[in-house]
Image (spheres, helix red, strand yellow):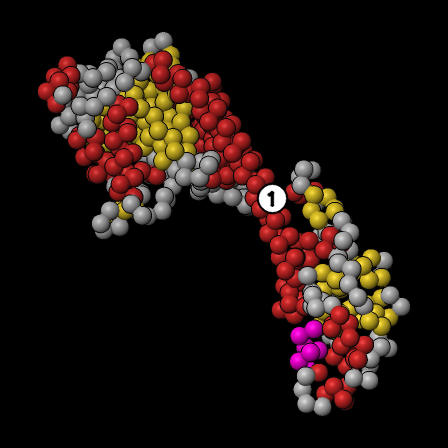
Amino acid sequence: MDNHFSLTPAMGSSLYQPTAGALAVNVPVVSFDENNAEVLEIFGQHKELVSLPVVEQGRPIGLISRHIFMSQMSKPYHRELYERKSCIAFMDKNPLIVDADTPIETLGALAVASGDKTLADGFLIVDGGKLSGLGSGLELMRMLVALQEEKNRQVMQSIDYASVIQRAMLSTSRSAMSQALDDACLVWEPRDVVGGDFYHFEHHADGWFAAVADCTGHGVPGAFLTLIASSSLKQALELHGPRDPALVMNEVNRSMKRVLGQQADSEKQSESDDGMDACFFWFETGSRQLVCANAKMSLFVLSGDGETVQTVDGKRTGLGYVDTPDGMQWENRSVTVEPGAVVFVSTDGVIDQIGGAKNIAFGKQRLRNLLQEHRHLPMPELGRQVMATHRSYQGTQRRRDDVTFFGCRPGGISTNNHEHQEQRT
């Protein structure tokens, strides 16, 4: 068997795709002017031979299937009638013939297009027009499977490393959050290996800025979009500072539309319509004022006594989309966060997850009730309770989206909450 390989640039320099020549097996052949008695003798001597190539001056002109030939010759009087006649009587005159340098994936497509006979009886492989050997449909399938497995392995290696990069990109914000907040939780759980959610956190002398965002899609496309959105956010913060979230949001919208070429008044219609939902918020430590801007993402504030949950909503318009105006103006909303209060924001991967006995969305109300139920717990434990309840609610349903949420007590657990904890203990 000859080993023919060709480099397929689209698959990268580390993956060589075998060609048809790798499947060429040397087998007996019969000349077009030989008779069926000689064909019968060859099949009798080579029990493993599925098909017999017919050649003329070394060039293949057809293929005789053992199954068809033996079936015909076993019929009454057929052996007497055809034994001395030319072997082309039972020859397939249009078998699949391919060059030895044909890529395996191309060969697979040709084999499928030529029909079941190619997979059953095989195909002829030529090199310079001369017969190189007979190819087996079964071996072709095995090689295609092996090639696909190798491609999948390389793709998954790339995606796994992309996950390392994405997590590293987010690690700075997680570290800043740990330095700024004594009681906080942060969950980032992509549906696939990489995801379309991201978060951002900055610690300043007089407070901190946080952002939670959900980009269009998930998996690799969503992850690419997070790079664009995160870069736009960092540039906007450098330009305008963190204390006016709405202004930052306006700038991120313009930047994303520009990078993605999604301006509505552009002469050339954009091939994409991608963007993100987000919540940007600034907390001033001295005044305990939380200022937030919302784009299709709610922020929840659980009161210090745990009795009420305030939902802060914003505009029902996402950032960066074709239909979102370049000059779109989001608005700031201000909330005073009393000691012991909980600030919580999540992407719709939490709220929109289908599950439960009625197969309906998890919903905002169920999330609010969950925050109240576990209000006495430290935030890391509260975050674990949210995820445990969410997974239980999901049950056998598939995960619909990436899940990201951020929660904190800007002033730590209040004295009343400490007393509740001691009583529960």
Local crowd size for mark 1, using a 10 Å CA cut-off: few (<14), some (14–19), many (≥20):
few
- Residue interval drawn in magenta: 66-72
Which residue has dot 1 on it? Answer: 150
What is the chief secondary structure element of the magenta stretch? Answer: helix
State the residue lying farthest toward the front: 45
Q: Work out whether residue 276 or residue 305 is closer to the camera in this orientation and state it.
A: 305
Element type at mark 1: helix
- Residue found at x 47% / y 18%: 238
Q: Is residue 199 above or below residue 270?
A: above
Quarter of the image containing the C terminus?
A: top left
Q: Is residue 129 left or right of residue 407?
A: right
User: Does 50 lie within the magenta span?
Assistant: no
Q: x, y (%) of residue 2?
A: 78, 51
Q: x, y (%) of residue 280?
A: 36, 26
- Residue found at x 76% / y 89%: 80
Amino acid, disc 1: Glu
Q: Is residue 126 left or right of residue 251?
A: right
Q: Work out whether residue 7 or residue 358 is closer to the camera in this orientation and state it.
A: 7
Q: Is residue 156 something that shows in the picture?
A: yes
Q: Is residue 80 left or right of residue 366?
A: right
Q: Work out whether residue 357 or residue 36 is closer to the camera in this orientation and state it.
A: 36
Q: x, y (%) of residue 4?
A: 76, 49
Q: x, y (%) of residue 10?
A: 66, 43
Q: Is residue 418 above or below residue 353?
A: above
**The image quarter in which residue 296 lies:** top left
- Residue found at x 21% / y 23%: 377
**The image quarter in which residue 198 lies:** top left
- Residue found at x 29% / y 34%: 387
User: Does 68 lie within the magenta span?
Assistant: yes
Q: Work out whether residue 296 or residue 74 is closer to the camera in this orientation and state it.
A: 74
